[in-house]
Amino acid sequence: MDDDSTHYKHADEAIAMLKTIYCRDGADAAVQAAKHMISAAAALVTCQYGPDEARRILWIVGEAQGKAS
């Protein structure tokens, strides 16, 4: 199993990729890329852990969005 530093590394890489897209292509492209990343992650989680876990993760994303606005 990966340790926490590996998990943070993956998150940092995803953020770096989104920042690159934002700088290169603008906010709309970065938002679309983030949506695709979330959709792909939800599909993978559904396959690996089932739809309940995917719903839980998507709920967390929704909660984070609510706190950011």
Image: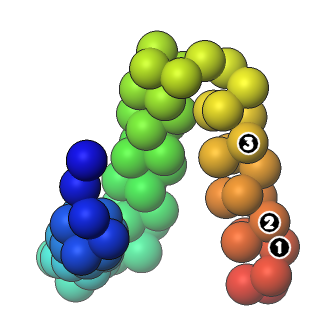
Residue 9 visible in this rendered orientation of the protein: yes
Q: Can you give x and y, in whole percent of width and height, for residue 6 in the image?
A: 21, 66
Disc 2 marks a residue whose amino acid type is Glu
Residue 21 versus residue 29 in the image, above or below? below
| Residue under pointer 1 | 66
Disc 1 to disc 3: CB gap under 8 Å: no
Disc 1 marks a residue whose amino acid type is Gly
Identify the element where label 1 is drawn: helix
Disc 3 marks a residue whose amino acid type is Arg
Q: Can you give x and y, in whole percent of width and height, for residue 34 in the image?
A: 43, 56
Identify the element where label 2 is drawn: helix
Q: Can you give x and y, in whole percent of width and height, for residue 31 in the image?
A: 46, 62
CA gap, disc 3 and disc 2: 10 Å
| Residue under pointer 2 | 63
Residue 18 visible in this rendered orientation of the protein: no
| Number of numbered discs visible in the structure rendering | 3
Q: Residue at x 48, y 46 (%)?
A: 38
Q: Residue at x 72, y 58 (%)?
A: 60
CA gap, disc 1 and disc 2: 5 Å
Residue 52 versus residue 2 in the image, above or below? above
| Residue under pointer 3 | 56
Q: Quadrant of residue 66?
A: bottom right
Q: Quadrant of residue 5?
A: bottom left
Q: Residues within 10 Å of mark 3 (few under 14, many from 20)?
A: few
Quarter of the rendering occupied by the C terminus: bottom right
Disc 1 to disc 2: CB gap under 8 Å: yes
Q: Residue at x 40, y 33 (%)?
A: 40
Q: Residues within 10 Å of mark 2 (few under 14, many from 20)?
A: few
Identify the element where label 3 is drawn: helix
Disc 3 to disc 2: CB gap under 8 Å: no
